[in-house]
């Protein structure tokens, strides 16, 4: 029992929890099964460009405490995400805003755009949206649903929009102004020099062991600490005893190109059904790069299976019900706490993951004091 806490996973949740408990005077060990820290926010330098190895990560939050927290470990630039949608070669601004409506229908005023959407909503006969399709049509009408949402969503989630929860599409703003900012949050940016450097700063002075899979040697690891914080998939922890939870995975195809500018924007979404990938990321634009070359990644969405990393929990009814069964087991674990996107099976953004890690740390510290 050499450690107060064993933290399983060196992603954002694990790193923030480990930082807080270390600062509170606890002895913490972090283990990570990959050969690097930072979890899915990991960035690596290729040709002088910070490449987001596990998908594009834009930090955004309205939580001042969280913004101040991350700024302790990195300096953030003023990057604002404004993806472009490509539908069969036609380009549309995202998120849905007056530029999108103008391109779609030729309208120039918010009033005209609202009239078209309201007409399309009425024609579709939706009053209480029960799934992603109905929610999307009710927010932006059938044209935008067909051109910018249906194909992309069905590629990304591998399920019909009628079987997906409505909340997924409510992540995107709909604006009747000329504003291409993908997020409504008060703060936004990219840590200059990459997320890996930021997480390394969070973990400074804390013992981290890489390429150690907790589940391969659970008993030994459990014996090393008073308490365990586990941020891996909750179903794997319990040997999938109720059956596996569904996750979506991504295959990344990354290329270095001998051109300074491939697509002129960090994020291009391919919203038609026929293009096999969902997005092309051109990494240099996250940091306004001036390198002579460029690095792009195509993202192909797939169902997670052995060998494919789980990235997105599929929070539909079936999986949420199954998760509740794992959650009940998790609550009964005598010395293990579960956290993060995989440990809590939640479609958490980075700021929410950090908030949850800081809250858990506060709870642990308070419990200790009383
Ligand atoms: P992770 O980063 O997954 O960390 C968990 C760690 O635990 C991993 O490193 C894993 O290897 C390790 N682990 C698992 N099992 C074991 C084991 N048995 N033993 C040892 N180690 C183990 N959020 C935003 O706010 N903005 C974005 O733009 C954004 N874009 C995203 C794009 C993609 C493609 C994805 C998938 C997510 C995106 N997110 C974004 C969400 C963001 O990635 C998560 O909120 C955050 O990374 C979750 O941190 P975490 O620590 O919970 O999980
Ligand atoms: N979405 C879409 N078309 C787009 C972009 C997003 O239909 O061009 C939908 C899709 O269902 C996606 C959801 O909106 O899952 C949320 O998008 P977001 O960009 O937040 O997804 P993430 O960052 O999780 O990949």
Image: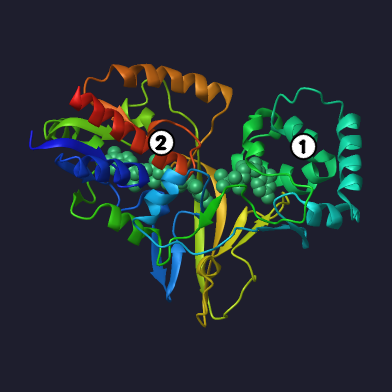
From the top left corner, tell me how far across and down residue 89 is, in percent: 77, 63
9 on left or right of 3: right
What residue do we see at 33% from left, 61% from top?
197
Q: Secondary structure at mark 1?
A: helix
Q: Nearer the viewer, mark 1 or mark 2?
A: 1
Q: Residue at x 61, y 49 (%)?
A: 183
Marks 1 and 2, how far apart in space? 30 Å
Q: Residue at x 69, y 32 (%)?
A: 132
- The quarter of the displayed image where residue 232 is located: top left
Q: Quadrant of residue 31?
A: top left
Q: Is residue 21 above or below residue 337?
A: below
> 199 or 241, which is in the foreground?
199
Give the image's coloring scheme. Answer: rainbow
Q: Nearer the viewer, residue 129 or 87?
A: 129
For label 2, being within 8 Å of ligand 1 is answered yes
Between residues 24 and 118, which one lies in front from this camera angle? 24
Residue 86 x/y as whole percent: 73, 59
Quarter of the image with the N terminus is top left
Q: For numbered disc 2, what is the local secondary structure?
A: helix
- Reading the image, the residue beneath label 1 is 139
Task: Give the residue at x 47% y 33%.
Answer: 346
Examine the rendering and report whether any part of residue 41 can be seen: yes
Of labels 1 and 2, earlier in sequence is 1
Residue 232 visible within the image:
no
Q: Which residue is mark 2?
A: 342
- Indicate yes or no: mark 1 CB to ligand 2 under 8 Å: no
Pick out the residue farthest to the bottom: 292
Residue 160: give x, y in percent of width and height. Answer: 68, 34
Residue 260 x %, y %? 57, 80
Within 10 angstroms of label 2, few (less than 14), some, or many (20 or more) residues?
A: many
- Is residue 138 toward the left or the right of residue 63 in the image? right
Q: Which mark is residue 350?
A: none
């Amino acid at each position: 029992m050499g450690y107060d806490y064993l933290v399983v996973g060196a992603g954002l949740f694990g790193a923030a929890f480990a930082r807080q408990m270390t600062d509170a005077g606890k002895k913490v060990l972090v283990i990570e099964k990959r050969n690097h820290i930072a979890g899915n926010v990991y960035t690596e330098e290729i040709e002088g460009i910070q490449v987001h190895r596990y998908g594009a990560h834009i930090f955004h939050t309205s939580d001042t405490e969280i913004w101040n927290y991350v700024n302790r470990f990195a300096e953030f630039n003023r990057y604002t995400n404004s993806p472009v949608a490509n539908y069969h070669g036609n380009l549309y601004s995202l998120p849905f805003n007056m530029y999108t409506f103008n391109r779609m229908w030729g309208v120039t005023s918010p009033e005209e755009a609202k009239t078209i959407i309201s007409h399309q909503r009425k024609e579709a006969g939706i009053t209480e949206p029960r799934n992603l399709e109905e929610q999307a049509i009710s927010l932006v009408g059938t044209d935008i649903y067909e051109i910018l949402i249906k194909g992309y969503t069905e590629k990304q989630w591998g399920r019909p929009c009628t079987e997906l929860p409505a909340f997924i599409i409510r992540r995107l703003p709909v604006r009747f102004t000329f504003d291409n900012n993908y997020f409504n949050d008060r703060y936004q940016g990219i840590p200059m020099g990459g997320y890996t450097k930021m997480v390394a700063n969070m973990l400074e002075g804390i013992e981290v062991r890489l390429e150690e899979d907790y589940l391969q040697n659970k008993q030994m690891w459990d014996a090393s600490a008073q308490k365990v914080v586990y941020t891996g998939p909750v179903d794997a922890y319990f040997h999938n005893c109720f059956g596996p939870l569904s996750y979506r995975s991504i295959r990344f195809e990354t290329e270095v190109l001998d051109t300074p500018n491939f697509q002129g924007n960090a994020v291009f979404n391919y919203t038609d059904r026929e293009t096999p990938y969902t997005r092309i990321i051109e990494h240099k634009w996250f940091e306004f790069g001036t390198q002579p070359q460029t690095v792009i990644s195509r993202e192909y969405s797939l169902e997670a299976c052995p060998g494919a990393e789980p990235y997105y929990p599929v929070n539909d009814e079936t999986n949420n019900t199954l998760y509740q069964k794992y959650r009940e087991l998790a609550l009964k674990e005598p010395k293990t706490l579960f956290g993060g996107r995989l440990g809590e099976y939640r479609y958490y953004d980075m700021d929410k993951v950090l908030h949850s890690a800081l809250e858990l740390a506060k709870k642990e510290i308070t419990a200790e004091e009383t």
